[in-house]
Image (cartoon, grey):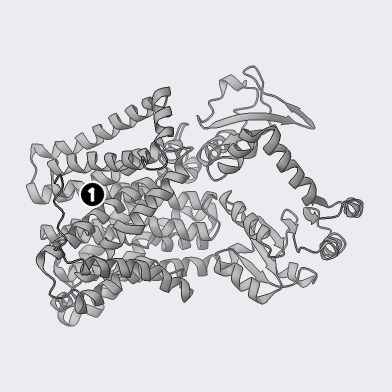
Amino acid sequence: MLLNISFHFDFFPLFVVAAIAWFTPVFLSLFKLKKIPSVIVEIILGYFVGQYLLEGIDSESFRILEFFALAGFIFLMFLGGLEIDVDQIVASLPRRKLTYSRFLKNPLLVGVSQFAIAIVLAYVGTLLLSMVIDIPSIWYFSLIMVTTSVGIVLPVLKDRGEIHTRFGQMVIIAAAVADIFSIILFTFTAFIIKNGFQYELLYIFALFILFFIVYKLINRLKNVPIFNKLSYQLSQAASQIRIRGSILMIMIFVVISQYIGEEVVLLGAFLSGLVLSSMLHRERSLLLVKLDGMGFGFFIPFFFIMVGVEFDPSALAEFDQSLIWFLIALLITLFVIKVVPSVLWGRLFGMRKAISGGFLMSSRLSLIIAASAIGLGLGVITPGINASFIIMAVITCFISPVVYNWMTLGNILSGNKTIIIGGSSTAVLLARRLNVHGRKAIIVEKDKERYKEINNKGVHALHGDGCEADIFQKLKLKHDNYVVIETGDDEQNLKISKLLRNEYQHEKIISRISRFSLEQKYKSLGVETIDVTQILATAIENLIVRPTTYHALVESFENFSVDEIAITNKDIDGLQLKEVLFHQDAILMMVKRGDNFYIPHGETYFRLGDVLHVFGTDTAMEDTKRKLGA
C-alpha cells in the first residue's frame, strides 16, 4: 500500500466545530441578525461547546483542533493582507510639495498621523490603567489597544454605500495603516521580549526583502506569454493553479518566518496576502471569492470557535473587586484612542462625520485576539487580561457599527444621492451597482413587505408612494439628485414624472418606458427615458456583433468602470497627453471639450474644463481624479 489510512480517529470534535460553523450564519440569517459578525457568535458557542461537549476529549483530538485553529489564524492574517489595496496606498504617496491642506486631503499621511496619535494615547491610557491592575508590559499592552478590524470596517462602509467615497477611502486606508504598523510593531516587540536585542532581529528584515523579490518576480512573470497561458489553462477544474499558487505563497512566507521565530509567523502570513493583493487586478474578484470560501468556509471558523473553547472566565478572578471598573475603563480607553485622532478628518467632512469614523475604527476583532494570545504565551499578558481583551473584541464589534450608523443616519438622505422610485429587482440591482461606484442610492417602495425585504438585503429603502408629493420632502430632494422611476407601470411612471417636473421643477429624471408611443410625452416634459425593448435589442446585437467586448465590459464590472473626470487642476492646463503620467490601470478613451468630442493621442493638449472619459480600476480612477482635480 502506498498510503496507510486509519479510521481509528475520533471525528466527533471536528463534527462539532463544523456544525457550529454551519449553524452560525444560518441562525443569524433566520433571525435577521446579519449585522452581528458571525465570529462573535462562533466565540460564544465555542465557549459553551468547550464546557459541555468537548470536555474530556483526548489530547490527540484536541491537538488536531488546535492545528486547524492555527491554520485558520494564518489564513486570517493572509486574508487581512489581501484586503489591503496596495495600489491605493502607493497612489496616496505625496508627489507634490506638502502643505497643510494637501496633508489633510492625503489619506495615507492622515492615516499614519492618526496611528501615531493613537499609540501615544494608548501608552498614556495603559499607564493610567496600570494604577488599577498589574500590567506586566506597558508597551505591549499599548500595541494591543491600537489594533483595528478591517474585516468589520469594510462591510459596514460597503453596507452604507460609502466604500468608494472619499470618506470611505480615508477610513479604509487609516484602518489598513493601523493593521500594517500594528503587525510590524507586534513582530519586533514579541521577538525582542522572547530573545532580547540580538543580531537575529535583523532576520525579520529578510521577510521584507523576500516580499520585494517575490513582488518583482511575479510582476515579471505576469508579462511572460507562456506563464499567462499556463495560468489561464490550469486555473479551472481540478488544477485550480491560482489557488494552489496562493497556498504555496502563504507557505513560503510562513516557513521562512518560522525559521526566524514563531512570533514572526503572523507578519509572514500578512505579507503573503499583501504580495497577492499587489498583483491582483483583472482576476481579483474570482480569486478572492475562492480564497474567502476556503478561509471563512473552513479554516477561520476553527480559530474563533477554539478561542471560545479555550476562554477561561475564571481568569477574571485575578482582578478581585476591581474587575468591573477595569473593564469599563478599558472600554472607554479603546474608544478614546481611536475617536480623538479622527478629529483630523473634521475639516474635510465635519466633526460629526469624523467622530463617527473614529467609532467605526474602534471595532477590534481578529488582531486584538491574536495579539493578546501571543502576549499570553510570552508571559507579558496575564490570563485575566487576555480574557478581558476577548470580551472587549465582542463588545466593540457590537457597539462600533451601531454608533457609526446612528451618527451617520442623516447622511443617507443628505448630499448627492440617487432616488429610485419602485422596488423591482432591477431597482435593487441598480442601487447595488451605484454603491459599487461609491454613489448613495435610496429606493422608495410603497409595498410594506417588499420594503422590508429590500432593507434586509442591505439596500437603503424608504416606505412610501412616489405619487405623493410629501415623499420627496422626506427624501430632502436636491436639484442635483437623479430620480429614476421604475415602478413597472407606464402610467404610474408618467404621473410621477409630471409631479416632479410641475411641483418641484426637477430636471434630473430618468424613467423607464415599455411603449414607444409614450416617448413623445416624456420629451415634452424634458424627461430622459429608457426603452426596455430597445436596450434588450442592443444587448443581443452586441452579443452577436461584438461578443468578446460585451462580455469583457459586463463581467469585469466590479473591477473596471468608465468615468467622466473634469480637468480643474491649473497645472494640467496646456500640457500634452504625453506629459501627464496616468495610472497604469487607466485608459483615456475620449476628450469632451464644449460640445465636441476628440479621440486623444500623445500630442493632444488639455484645457481647463475638458471632460475626460477614462476606463480603469477604482484605484486608477481615484489617482486620475487626484491628478486632474484642483
Type of amino acid at the residue the image marks with label 1? Leu
Q: Is residue 550 above or below residue 373?
A: above
Residue at image point 61% right, 42% down: 554
Q: Is residue 498 left or right of residue 177?
A: right
Q: Identify residue for label 1.
A: 266
- Residue 138 visible to the viewer: no
Nearer to us in this view, 379 or 436? 436
Residue drawn 53% across and 25% down? 581
User: Which quadrant is the C terminus positioned in?
Assistant: top right
Residue lying furthest front: 1
Q: Residue furthest bottom?
A: 321
Residue nearest the observer in this picture, 608 or 188: 188
Q: Is residue 275 above or below residue 390?
A: above
- Observer-nearest residue: 491 or 81? 491
Q: Position of residue 353 (x, y in %)?
A: 51, 60
Q: Residue at x 40, y 32 (%)?
A: 231
Q: Secondary structure at mark 1?
A: helix
558 lies left or right of 131 = right
